[in-house]
Amino acid sequence: MTTPTKFSPAPVIDETARLLTEHYVFPEIAEQLTALLQRRLLDGAYDVDGAEELARLVTADLQSVNGDRHLRLKHHADPVPPQQGAANLDAMRRDFDTSLGGAPRVQLLDGGVAVLELAPMLFPLEWAAEPLSAALTLASRARALIVDLRANKGGDPDTVAFVCGYLLDERTHLNTMHWRGGEHTEQSWSLPHVPGARFGGSKPLYVLSSDSTFSAAEELAYDLQQLGRAVVVGEPTRGAAHPCEGWTVHPHLEVTVPIGRAVNPVSGANWEGTGVQPDVLCAAADSLDHAHALALAQLAG
């Protein structure tokens, strides 16, 4: 009989510490976290039976210093590819194919108010441009628009800029990414032209949020809110503003490390740790009814 190989956390911790040191946008926090992980390893805190439990413990420790929600050791039930960032690609493609490309709902409510749901994420723009353009063009004829991000778990910042292009009248500075080291920055702007009809920048616009709204979906809500373009209705979002990359560190484990930080040109800040704070606070389950009522009142006024 073959004796099962005991799970060893040390290689995972060592590689996670190396990636933090090389890539985390806040080098001083990376130093603290590396010391914490190594200390916890020596103390036996990671002597567990499998990868799933290790992922839970390490993620809690990674987020214990500055609460960075993008800093995670993620467990995957199926083996993950060794290529950087490839862990979720197959699952992402399945979600894309089963959600009409990330726009599973376009509905016209009473009074000429349209609802556009963007879920379960803002997919890579090379995939999503066509279905999003179709959905946004269809919604452009509405008198008011409600963009539902309550079940959106994030995605591609380029897709955020693409969507904003349909909701504004002109090319607009949305965000600036500051990469590790502080010397290199990258600005994000809405598109000057879109491949469809714009809803535009003057008709009533509402965004629905929940405590599940995450990452790039938070950026979409925050950018539109800071520009004064949209009213956010619902719950505070999860509070993850740092773009990240993923590396496979074990056949079933992926470490995600933020490599930059977002700075909004209006607020000079971002939503990291605080979440996007709604203009109209209510339970997420009630937010659609609230936004519809607000839209009808604004149209009537």
Image (tube, rainbow, N blue to C red):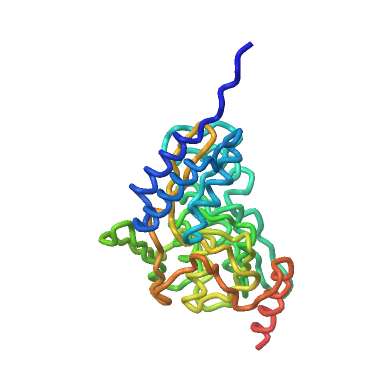
Question: Which of these two is toward me, 81 or 69?
Answer: 69
Residue at 38 percent of width and 73 percent of height:
265
Residue 164 x/y as whole percent: 48, 66
Q: Quadrant of the N terminus?
A: top right
In front of the other: 31 or 205: 31
Point 50% across, 72% down: residue: 224
Residue 97 percent coordinates (x, y) = 60, 43
Name of the residue lying farthest toward the left: 183
Query: Splitting the image into 4 quarters, where does residue 280 fall?
Result: bottom right
In percent of width and height, residue 278 lies at 60, 74
Residue 209 percent across, percent down from the top left: 62, 66
- Residue 135, relative to residue 265: is it above or below? above
- Residue 35 visible, this orientation: yes
- For residue 135, above or below residue 22: below
Residue at left offset 67%, top offset 80%: 294
Q: Residue at x 54, y 61 (%)?
A: 217
* Furthest residue in direction top, as rendered: 1
Q: Quadrant of the C terminus?
A: bottom right
Q: Is residue 18 left or right of residue 114?
A: left
Q: Looking at the picture, tell me which residue is in the foreground, 89 or 85.
A: 85
Q: How many marks?
A: 0
Nearest to the observer: residue 279 or residue 82: 82
As drawn, which residue projects farthest toward the front? 43
Task: Kindly tell me whether residue 192 is visible in this rendering.
Answer: no
